[in-house]
Image (spheres, rainbow, N blue to C red):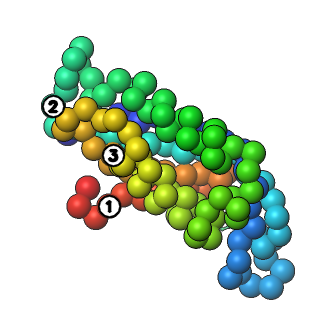
Amino acid sequence: MHRIGKSFGFEAAHRLSGLPEGHKCGRSHGHSYSVEVRLAARRLSGPGFVADFAVLDEFRAYLQRTFDHRDLNDVMDAEPTSENLARHFFRWCATGLALPDGVRVESVRVSETASTWAEYAPEEA
Ligand SMILES: Nc1nc2c(c(=O)[nH]1)N=C([C@H](O)[C@H](O)COP(=O)(O)OP(=O)(O)OP(=O)(O)O)CN2
Ligand SMILES: [Zn+2]
């Protein structure tokens, strides 16, 4: 299997519900989010690509348009945890990107900080 990945960033605010009283993440605060999208293919095409990294430009535009400098509680239907964001971005990429035949989105990883991450990958991947 061949795999490629590309990372993107955006700045956003959020607050999380369902946490113990006084938990710091229940207060509105912000993160410099990092999102890594991984694509996979059994065979290379063109000059020897899984896909041109530029195929992910649409995802960058989506992040900038919809998530950058936003309150994620306004943007997301679900609680704006890293896990829910990773699943949301995976589903967007799986349906919103114009991927070459034989190329699939393997996983999406979201980081709120340099030391944490959450990843979504469908079970069959
Ligand atoms: N599994 C998850 N746990 C937490 C999430 C999450 O999305 N998934 N999110 C948060 C908060 O957003 C919080 O802002 C970030 O938490 P944390 O990394 O613990 O915060 P710090 O950067 O301040 O880390 P310290 O190690 O406490 O300095 C919480 N948990
Ligand atoms: Zn947070």
Return the residue at label 3: 105
* SS at badge 2: loop
Of the 4 image quadrants, the one containing the N terminus is top left
Going from N to C along the chain, the mark reached first, 2 or 1, is 2
Q: Residue furthest bottom?
A: 21
Give the spatial CA distance, label 3 vs label 2.
14 Å
Q: Mark 3: few, some, or many residues within 10 Å (few <14, many ≥20)? A: many
Ligand 1 within 8 angstroms of badge 3 C-beta? no
Return the residue at label 1: 122
In the rendered image, the vertical position of residue 36 relative to residue 55, given as above or below? below
Looking at numbered disc 1 in the image, what kind of residue is underneath it?
Answer: Pro
Give the spatial CA distance, label 3 vs label 1.
10 Å
Q: How many marks?
A: 3
Of the 4 image quadrants, the one containing the C terminus is bottom left
Going from N to C along the chain, the mark reached first, 3 or 2, is 2
Looking at numbered disc 2 in the image, what kind of residue is underneath it?
Answer: Arg
What residue sits 55% from the left and 41% below the top? Answer: 62
What residue sits 54% from the left and 35% below the top? Answer: 60
Looking at numbered disc 3 in the image, what kind of residue is underneath it?
Answer: Val
Q: Mark 2: few, some, or many residues within 10 Å (few <14, many ≥20)? A: few
The reply to whether the C-beta atoms of the residues labelled 3 and 1 are less than 8 Å apart is: no
Q: Nearer the viewer, residue 47 or 24?
A: 47
- In the image, 92: left or right of 11? left
- The x, y position of residue 110, in whole percent, is 55, 52
Return the residue at label 2: 43
Q: Can residue 2 be seen?
A: no
In the rendered image, the vertical position of residue 86 relative to residue 26, given as above or below? above
